């Protein structure tokens, strides 16, 4: 059966791990009542995100975070608790992963059987590299909803990231985020925020150019000096938004025949099959 209900969460998660796990359990219970197969929760939903971001590419911060997310192991008690509530569902959750003395901003793909795969955020914006190491791999995993790839937030701004997952056979890509509103020329209404508009454009473009089902979650509300834009959504392989939340709390649900939707989108023009990779050569230019 290739028809599944997908859920994308827009909600606020802070530093209180126990409270976060309770919120995850409530969201899963609600999603299960709707027959949901895949639920994508926000970036850093198990321990909260950074409370500030830097000001530019030099990685400097005008201020330091007042605290850092607690570190967790992929096989630790927090992810085991997530697996226990997941049961037959597939969840994508964000956490600060420990690896010896290193920290990664990670997304875990979890079912009742445990952690199926972990994506470590590759692209680091605005000084995030001061607190996390960067991931180095884009790889999809087999799940009950089909072959699934995960990305985190700023990863979606790079076409190569989603394309790498699509070329690895991903039929569904879950991109979990803590995407904030613009910090300059701010809009009074988050719906008009320019960074929110970029968030939405990236979601639709990545789905369309790879002809995949795209499930985008996001933090909502505020944390420290950050104000998040919410706007979780499910996007079809033609770039059409099938369901979306507001800029506040909510869950976007959409039922999708994955095989049928992908076959329909790829019948006339198959973007992956029509590629000319021999022509895509990186120029010897430095962009530093």
Image (cartoon, grey):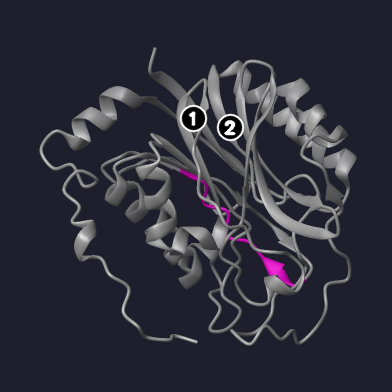
Q: Nearer the viewer, residue 68 or 234?
A: 68
Per the image, is 44 magenta?
Answer: no
Q: Is residue 214 above or below residue 184?
A: above
Per the image, is 229 magenta?
Answer: yes
Q: Residues within 10 Å of mark 1 (few under 14, many from 20)?
A: many
Q: Is residue 35 left or right of residue 268?
A: right
**Residue at figure coordinates x 45%, y 30% from the top left:** 147
Query: Which numbered marker is on residue 6?
Result: 1
Q: Is residue 263 above or below residue 223?
A: above
Q: Residues within 10 Å of mark 2 (few under 14, many from 20)?
A: many
Q: Quadrant of residue 177?
A: bottom right
Q: Nearer the viewer, residue 35 or 267?
A: 267
Q: Gap between marks 2 and 1, in whole Å?
A: 6 Å
Residue 15 location (% of width, % of height) = 86, 53
Extent of the magenta region: 225-233
Question: Label 2: which residue?
Answer: 39
């Amino acid at each position: 059966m290739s028809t599944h209900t997908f859920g994308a969460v827009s909600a606020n998660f802070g530093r209180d791990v126990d409270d976060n796990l309770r919120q995850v359990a409530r969201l899963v219970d609600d999603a299960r009542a709707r027959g949901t197969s895949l639920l994508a929760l926000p970036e850093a939903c198990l321990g909260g995100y950074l409370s500030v971001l830097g000001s530019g590419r030099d990685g400097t911060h005008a201020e330091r975070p007042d605290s850092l997310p607690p570190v967790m192991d992929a096989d630790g008690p927090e992810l085991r608790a997530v697996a226990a509530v997941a049961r037959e569902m597939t969840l994508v959750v964000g956490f600060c992963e420990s690896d010896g003395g290193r920290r990664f901003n990670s997304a875990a793909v979890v079912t009742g059987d445990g952690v199926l795969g972990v994506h470590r955020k590759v692209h680091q914006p605005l000084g995030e590299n001061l607190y996390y190491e960067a991931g180095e791999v884009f790889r999809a995993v087999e799940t009950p909803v089909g072959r699934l790839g995960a990305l985190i937030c700023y990863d979606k701004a790079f076409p190569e990231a989603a394309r790498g997952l699509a070329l690895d056979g991903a039929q569904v890509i879950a991109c979990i985020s803590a995407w904030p509103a613009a910090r300059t020329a701010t809009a009074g209404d988050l719906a008009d925020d320019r960074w929110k508009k970029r968030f939405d454009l990236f979601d639709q473009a990545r789905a369309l150019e790879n002809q995949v089902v795209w499930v985008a979650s996001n933090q909502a509300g505020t944390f420290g000096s950050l104000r998040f834009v919410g706007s979780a959504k499910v996007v079809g392989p033609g770039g059409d938004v099938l369901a979306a939340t507001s800029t506040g709390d909510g869950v976007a649900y959409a039922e999708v025949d994955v095989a049928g939707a992908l076959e329909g989108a790829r019948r006339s023009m198959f973007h992956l099959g029509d590629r000319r990779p021999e022509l895509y050569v990186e120029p010897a230019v430095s962009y530093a």
